[in-house]
Image (tube, rainbow, N blue to C red):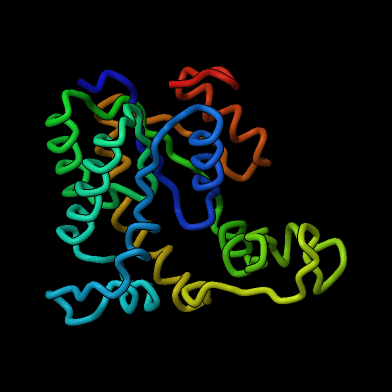
C-alpha cells in the first residue's frame, strides 16, 4: 500500500518547476511523472483525433487530447509503483479539470491521494526570456540562457569545453505564445479545482532557484535533506 505523498506541480512553461522536481528526485527520493518527457518518448505515436503524431502536435504548440495524455500518465504511474516508488511528483499534469478528475480516480486505485498542489507563479516576461533564451551543450547537457546564464566564454561550454549548442525545435516565439495562451485558458480551471479542495499552495517562481526550493520544501513540509 502506498502511504506517502503524491504531489502536483503546476506552472507555465519556463516557470522552473522541472528544476525543482529534479532536486526533489535526487535529494529527497521522489519519483517523477514528467508529462513532457513521456510525450517526447512517445513522439511517433499517432493521435487518432488529429491524424498527427505527438511530436507534430507538440512542435506546433498544441495541447494533446486528454485521453492520450492520461493513458501515458497512468502507464508511467504503474511502472514507477511496480519499481517501488511510493511518493510521486506530477510535472505538467493535470492540465485540465478532466485530467484532474481522472488523476483522483487513478490515485484512489493505489490507496492514496493528491496531498499538495504547488502553483509556480511567474510573470510572462520572465517566462518568455527563460524559454526563448534557453540552449544547451549536447556534450554534457549543461543548460544556458541568452538572458540569464550565458557561458563564461561565448561559444564554449563551461563544463566540457564543447563548442556546439542546440535549441529545442518547439522553443520558438509562435509556439510559445500558443502554449502560454492555452496554458492560461485551461489551467486556470485546474487551479480553481485544487483551491476548492484546500490543497493549493503558491510559490514565487520568479525568485532564484535556492529561494524557490526553500519555498517548495516549506509547502511540502520537508526539510532540506529529509527523504520521503
208 sits left or right of 106 in the view = right
Could you say where residue 75 lies in the image, as x and y percent from the top left?
A: 21, 49
Could you say where residue 122 lies in the image, as x and y percent from the top left?
A: 54, 48
Residue at 57% across, 42% down: 205
Residue at 52% across, 76% down: 173
- Asked where in the image residue 108 lies, by quadrant, the reply is top left
Q: Eyeballing the image, is 91 above or below 150?
A: above
Q: Eyeballing the image, is 80 above or below 187?
A: above
Could you say where residue 175 lies in the image, as x and y percent from the top left?
A: 44, 75
Q: Eyeballing the image, is 123 above or below 9?
A: below
The residue furthest front is 83
17 sits left or right of 162 in the view = left
Q: Quadrant of the C terminus?
A: top left
Q: Quadrant of the N terminus?
A: top left
The residue furthest right is 153
How many marks on residues?
0
Q: Nearer the viewer, residue 30 or 93?
A: 30
Residue at 12% across, 36% down: 105
Q: Nearer the viewer, residue 110 or 140?
A: 140
- Asked where in the image residue 160 lies, by quadrant, the reply is bottom right
Amino acid at each position: 500500500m502506498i502511504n506517502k505523498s503524491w504531489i502536483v506541480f503546476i506552472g507555465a512553461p519556463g516557470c522552473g518547476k522541472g528544476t525543482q522536481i529534479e532536486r526533489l528526485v535526487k535529494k529527497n527520493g521522489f519519483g517523477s511523472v514528467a508529462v513532457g518527457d513521456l510525450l517526447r518518448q512517445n513522439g511517433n505515436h499517432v493521435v487518432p483525433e488529429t491524424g498527427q503524431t505527438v511530436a507534430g502536435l507538440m512542435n506546433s504548440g498544441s495541447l494533446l487530447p486528454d485521453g492520450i495524455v492520461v493513458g501515458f500518465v497512468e502507464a508511467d504511474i504503474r511502472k514507477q509503483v511496480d519499481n517501488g516508488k511510493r511518493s510521486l511528483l506530477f510535472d505538467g499534469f493535470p492540465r485540465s479539470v478532466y485530467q484532474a478528475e481522472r488523476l483522483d480516480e487513478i490515485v484512489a486505485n493505489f490507496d492514496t491521494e493528491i496531498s499538495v498542489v504547488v502553483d509556480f507563479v511567474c510573470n510572462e516576461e520572465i517566462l518568455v526570456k527563460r524559454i526563448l533564451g534557453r540552449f544547451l551543450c549536447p556534450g554534457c547537457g549543461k543548460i544556458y540562457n541568452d538572458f540569464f546564464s550565458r557561458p563564461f566564454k561565448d561559444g564554449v561550454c563551461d563544463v566540457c569545453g564543447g563548442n556546439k549548442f542546440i535549441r529545442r525545435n518547439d522553443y520558438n516565439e509562435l509556439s510559445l505564445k500558443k502554449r502560454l495562451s492555452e496554458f492560461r485558458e485551461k489551467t486556470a480551471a485546474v487551479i480553481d479545482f485544487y483551491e476548492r479542495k484546500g490543497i493549493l499552495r503558491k510559490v514565487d517562481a520568479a525568485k532564484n532557484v535556492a529561494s524557490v526550493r526553500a519555498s517548495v520544501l516549506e509547502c511540502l513540509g520537508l526539510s532540506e535533506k529529509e527523504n520521503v
